[in-house]
Image (cartoon, grey):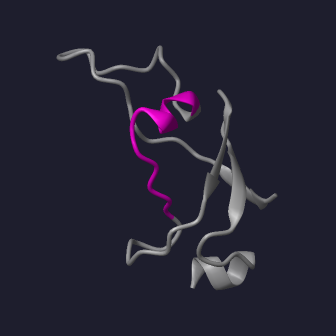
Amino acid sequence: ADAERLGVVAGQEVLLRSETGELRCRVHLAPIAPGNAQVHWPEGNILIADEVRSAEAGIPDYNTRVTLEAV
C-alpha cells in the first residue's frame, strides 16, 4: 500500500534522505508494517546518527525518519 501511495514499483531507483545523509537504492517490495522501510547494513549507516547509541552496549539507534523520492 505504501509503494502504491508513493508511486514506486519494484526495482525502481529511489533516494532516501534523513537528517544525517542520503542513500540511493532500489525498491524491493516486502510485507512489512505500513510506514516503514528496511535498509541493510552497512549501506544504511549513512542514514543514522552515529552519536545516538545505547548507554549499555554502545549500539547505534537503527531507527530514523526518512523521506523517499523517485530518482
Q: Main secondary structure of the magenta part?
A: loop
**Magenta stretch containing residue 17, yes or no?**
no
Give the extent of the magenta segment: 36-46
**Magenta stretch containing residue 37, yes or no?**
yes
Q: Quadrant of the N terminus?
A: bottom right
**Residue sitting farthest toward the left:** 56
Tell me: residue 44, above or below residue 12.
above
- Residue drawn at x 70%, y 60% is 13
Viewer-side residue, 16 vs 33: 16
Tell me: residue 64, above or below residue 34.
above
Tell me: residue 18, above or below residue 34.
above
- Residue drawn at x 49%, y 62% is 36
- The answer to whether residue 39 is left or right of residue 20 is left
x and y, in percent, of residue 7 in the image: 75, 79
- Residue drawn at x 57%, y 34% is 47
Q: Quadrant of the C terminus?
A: bottom right
x and y, in percent, of residue 27 in the image: 58, 65
In the rendered picture of this protein, how many numbered marks are placed on residues? 0
Tell me: residue 34, above or below residue 25.
below
x and y, in percent, of residue 8 in the image: 70, 75
- The answer to whether residue 41 is left or right of residue 59 is right
Viewer-side residue, 6 vs 25: 25
**Residue sitting farthest toward the right:** 71
x and y, in percent, of residue 11 in the image: 61, 70
- The answer to whether residue 47 is left or right of residue 61 is right
